[in-house]
Image: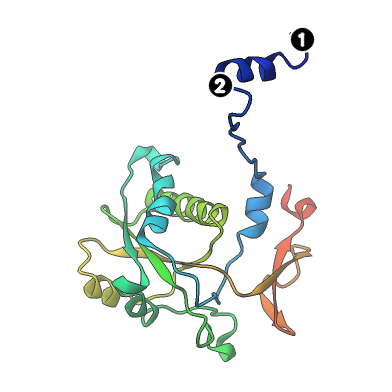
Amino acid sequence: MADGYLESRYDEVFGRNSKKTVVKHVPVDKLLERNRSYRGYHPETIVTEDTLRKIVSVNTLIPSACNQQVLRFKLVTKGEGSGRVLANVKMGAALPELHLPFPGTEPEAFIIVCSTAPETKLVDIDLGISAQSMLLKATELGYNGLIIGAFNKANIQQEFSLPYEPLLVIAIGRGAEVIRRVEISENESHAYYRKEGVHFVPKVRLSDLIL
């Protein structure tokens, strides 16, 4: 096919001044690199229910163990009681002396993940796939997040009159921290740490991961 044929046909059909739709490709490695666990957020950033719905919508596309699709989601914005979630979660367990998040950097919104079935290995598989997929979507949209497993399940369930037991809480906002990934060997400490205001996350190098 001659060079420029498709471009010329586009102009013939749609007109020379028509705008072409350009789909920006973001490599998955870039999204994964940006998808760090944030424990501090910009307070001026508003996370709407529509944004949370877009993030949760990935669950209609992702795999599910035995195709059970048992996960259900409660969307909690600032106006819907994000403070009530915050009062029942713990963030930064490896840095208890910092009492994270710092005042004024609390998450703007949360997604509470529940299951219609009792927690099993298969449900946990779905939880991992769902949480990571939602955070990647949040990253694509320009937000950041944190998967929270340390929270008061009974209080959260009661506060929001949830019909199912909550299994995870995911914080969503626009990150206000500087986070750096540090390559380590498999025998070095895996604990994240902070130095001069920078949050460092150790990750085992590829050569040590492959058997």
Residue 21 percent location from the top left of the image: 58, 33
Residue 47 percent location from the top left of the image: 43, 65
| Residue at the far bottom in the pictured view | 97
135 on left or right of 211: left
26 on left or right of 61: right
Amino acid type shown at disc 1: Ala
Which tag is nearer the camera, tag 2 or tag 1? 2
Q: Residue at coordinates 39% horizontally, 79% vertically from top-left?
A: 86
Can you say whether 137 is above or below 165 in the image? above
Q: Residue at coordinates 71% horizontally, 63% vertically from top-left?
A: 203
Q: Residue at coordinates 31% horizontally, 48% vertically from top-left?
A: 70
Residue 155 percent location from the top left of the image: 27, 77
Can you say whether 178 is above or below 203 in the image? below
| Residue at the far top in the pictured view | 1
Who comes first in sequence, dot 2 or dot 1? 1
Quadrant of the rendered structure where residue 37 is?
bottom right
C-beta proximity under 8 Å, tags 2 and 1:
no
Query: Foreground: 205 or 90?
Result: 90
- Residue highlighted by disc 2: 14
- Residue highlighted by disc 1: 2
What colouring style does the render use? rainbow
Mark identifier at residue 193? none
Amino acid type shown at disc 2: Phe
Dividing the image into 4 quarters, which one contains the N terminus? top right
Label 1 Cα crowd, 10 Å radius (few <14 / some 14-19 / many 20+): few
Determine the CA span between mark 2 and mark 1.
Answer: 20 Å
79 on left or right of 141: left
